Amino acid sequence: MTIKEYFSSLFKAIVSLVKGLEVTGKELVTPKVTEQYPENRATLKIADRFRATLAFDYNDEGIHKCIACGICQMSCPNGTIEVKTKMVDTADGKKKKKLDKYMYDLGSCTFCMLCVTNCPTKAIKFTNEFEQSVYTREKLVQQLNYLPEKEAPAPAPVAKPAAPKAEAAKADAPAAAADDKVEMEVEAPNGKVMKVKLAKEDIDAIEKMVSEKPEMSKFQAMQAVIKAKKAPKA
Ligand code: SF4
Ligand code: SF4
């Protein structure tokens, strides 16, 4: 090695050292962001958008908005959600499908939020309660509808003007038809084929939408129809 080469490499080494120290120097004066957890548990602020665990959005009266439609279960790519339903008798003597148990396995959730995004009633949300450690995987399976269900108030009797029998039967016919649900098979994004029961008019709307927009799946059309029905009328 010549004298020139020796000093050239020495200079390069010094430049490289100064560059490295520049980063170290910056970090020395930058405000620290390290959280001293768990010592700072009382003052710890978790970002609002952090997805820690799925939860029901109960209102102040302890009522949730889940209608047990199962769309979240169908949307979930890895079978994390199981919606168990039951049939109940309503105050006006009809049968109605209601939520029995909403099971969520935190251990298999990827926090993709597809369930929350696709829920037509905004019944579920992600909370940022991140302290979810348990000793067994079984304990990660949670029932999200943990509050007792409240009874729906009985419908107020509606006074009907007297009508001839034939006329009354004619008037009741569309209502009876609306109660008739038709079964349809839809393929969820995770490939599961599920049977859903919807009103005939909804099925027709879904079929029409799919035929008009071939790029749209039956599942997406179903979501669009349910959302449109839930949207407040202008
Ligand atoms: S999509 Fe929403 S309303 Fe339907 S079952 Fe899931 S949480 Fe309930
Ligand atoms: S966030 Fe994703 S993985 Fe978790 S339950 Fe919802 S759809 Fe399933």
Image: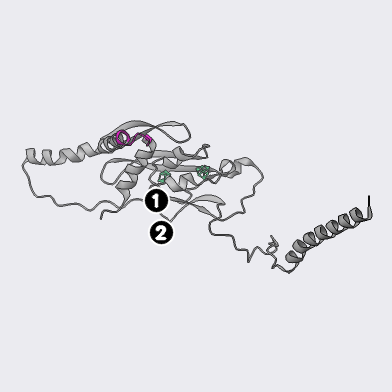
Q: For residue 111: magenta?
A: no
Residue 145 in percent (x, y) is at: 47, 48
Q: Nearer the viewer, mark 2 or mark 1?
A: 1
Magenta stretch secondary structure, dominant: loop
Residue 200 in percent (x, y) is at: 26, 35
Kindly identify which numbered label has been placed on residue 161.
Answer: none
CA neighbours of label 2 inside 10 A, class few (<14), some (14 to 19), many (20+): few
69 left or right of 105? left
Residues marked 2 and 1 touching at CB (< 8 Å): no
Task: Name which residue lies at 23% across and 39% down.
Answer: 178
Residue 53 in percent (x, y) is at: 55, 50
Give the residue at the far left of this rendering: 164
Read off the magenta span.
210-217
| Some atom of ligand 1 lies within 8 Å of the CB belonging to the residue at label 2 | no
Task: Name which residue lies at 38% across and 45% down.
Answer: 67
The answer to which quarter of the image holds residue 164 is top left
Task: Name which residue lies at 25% across and 38% down.
Answer: 201
Q: Which residue is nearer to you in this view: 23 or 202? A: 23
Q: Which residue is mark 2?
A: 61
**Amino acid on which disc 1 is placed:** Lys
The answer to which quarter of the image holds residue 166 is top left
Q: Which residue is nearer to you in this view: 132 or 146? A: 132
Q: Which residue is mark 1?
A: 65
Q: Give SS at disc 1.
A: loop
**Amino acid on which disc 2 is placed:** Glu
| Some atom of ligand 1 lies within 8 Å of the CB belonging to the residue at label 1 | yes
Q: For residue 212: magenta?
A: yes
Residue 211 in percent (x, y) is at: 30, 33
